[in-house]
Image (spheres, grey):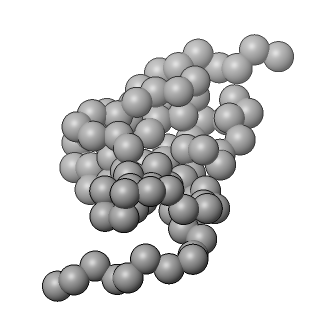
Amino acid sequence: MKDPKRQDWVLVGCERSRQVHRHVYGDDSPCIELCPKELFAFDGARALMRSCMVEGSFELCGNVAILPWGAELTLIEEAIRTLLDLPPPSS
């Protein structure tokens, strides 16, 4: 299968999408960010999210556990337990 011919388009995606675009077309395209990791307001609330930029285990960013897409249930449980073990936010 051939790659689509390069057009004057706007890429709607994340860093991984930009990497694929660069690999296929050899340049960058204007982009609208779609990554939850980039768009999430890290306001202290505990949260669980997925990111294609995380591989293997999970990352803890403050009170947010970021899992890879396709994470096994045991890894999700570990991330939730880690979040629950965090100290409560200070007032």
Tally of numbered tags: 0
Q: Is residue 23 left or right of residue 45?
A: left
Name the residue located 22 percent from the left edge and 49 percent from the top edge: 72
Which residue occupies 68% across, 35% down?
A: 42
Q: Give the quarter of the image for residue 66.
A: top left
Q: Quadrant of residue 78?
A: top left
**Position in image of residue 80 (x %, y %):** 42, 37
Placement of 14 over or under 83, stated as above or below? below
In the image, residue 86 lies at what x, y percent?
53, 20
Task: Answer yes or no: is residue 34 visible.
Answer: yes
Quarter of the image with the N terminus in it: bottom left
Which one is in front, 38 or 90?
Answer: 38
Residue 4, above or below 71:
below
Q: What residue is rendered at 70% in x and 20% in y?
A: 89
Q: Nearer the viewer, residue 50 or 29?
A: 29
Please say if 66 is above or below 9.
Answer: above
